[in-house]
Every structure is written in C-alpha cells, then in structure tokens.
Image: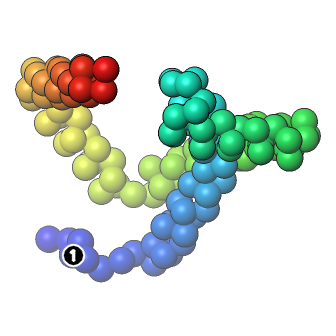
Amino acid sequence: MENVEKPAPGQFALPVFTALEWLLVLPATVFLFAAAFRGLQPVQYEPARTCAAIVAWTVAHVSQFGAAILFLGMPGSVVLAGCATLLRIWRKDAALRQDLAMTFAILRRHFAVGLLTAAVLLAGAILAAVAVHNITD
C-alpha cells in the first residue's frame, strides 16, 4: 500500500504555485465583489459604504491599462498557467486519475442524496434570508 504521508519530489512547489495563482486573482475578485455588494443596499449603510469606497478608490487610481492587466492579464495568466499545470499533473499522476474516477463513481451512485442535500441547503439559505429580512424590517 502506498504511503500517503510521504511527499513526492517537487510537491513543495505546487502549494506555492497555488498560493501565487490565488494572489493573482484576488484583486479582481475583491473589486468585483465590492461592485456587486455596493448595489445591494443604499450607500449610507454598511457594507455598501465600504464597497462604494473600494470601487471609488479603484476607479480613481487604476488606469485603463491597469484595468486591462487587472481584469484580463492576471486572470488570463492564471487560466493559462493553471491549465498547463493541471494537464501536467494529470498526465504524471496515475493515483490522481484513479481517485477522480472513484470520486465520480461515488457521486454518480449517490446523486439523489447530493441533490437532496443541495435542495435542503438552498431552502435553509432562503429561510435564513427571509428571517433576516423580516427581522430588519
């Protein structure tokens, strides 16, 4: 049986690469979430006020070229480098391929339970949102 605790050679580089990928996507993600949350309620209330401040600062300090880098260049480089890395890992790691095949088999076998779980979680989120709305109004 294979020892799962023993790291393979070069395994340290993958978590570092993953962290860098997330750091490249983080600025665009923060801006897009702030832009979305800004419109959920009037700007005089939090978190809309903070989100409006983030959006205003970004619009004032980021040029069109900077926005192109922020929204196209950085996520594009993450997609390209990430896909290349995933393809390389997929080709080299037979255990990953086997684990993924088993995972899909398990999910397919328990598909109805997964759908039921998703429906229960969605209904719970809806009830929580309605309860918060009723409490605050």
Answer whether residue 76 is visible to the viewer in this image. Answer: no
Q: Is residue 104 above or below residue 70?
A: above
Q: Quadrant of the C terminus?
A: top left
137 left or right, relative to 43: left
Residue drawn at 14 percent across, 36 percent down: 106
62 left or right, relative to 81: right
Answer whether residue 24 is visible to the viewer in this image. Answer: yes
77 left or right, relative to 62: left
Q: Is residue 130 above or below residue 78?
A: above
| Residue 18 locus on image (x, y percent) | 53, 60
Q: Indicate the colouring scheme.
A: rainbow
Residue drawn at 56 percent across, 54 percent down: 22
Residue drawn at 33 percent across, 47 percent down: 97
Depth check: 29 or 89 in front? 29
Helix, strand or loop for disc 1: loop
Q: Is residue 92 above or below residue 58?
A: below
Task: Specify the amino acid type for callout 1.
Answer: Asn
Residue drawn at 33 percent across, 53 percent down: 96
Q: How many marks?
A: 1
Q: Is residue 96 above or below residue 37?
A: below
| Residue 115 locus on image (x, y percent) | 16, 21
Depth check: 87 or 81 in front? 81
Depth check: 115 or 124 in front? 124
Q: In terms of image quadrants, where is residue 63? A: top right
| Residue 105 locus on image (x, y percent) | 17, 34
| Residue 118 locus on image (x, y percent) | 19, 25
Depth check: 94 or 57 in front? 57
Pointer 1: what residue? 3
Q: In terms of image quadrants, where is residue 68? A: top right
Within 10 Å of disc 1 (Cα), the crowding (few <14, some 14-19, many 20+) is few
Q: Quadrant of the N terminus?
A: bottom left
Q: In terms of image quadrants, where is residue 128? A: top left
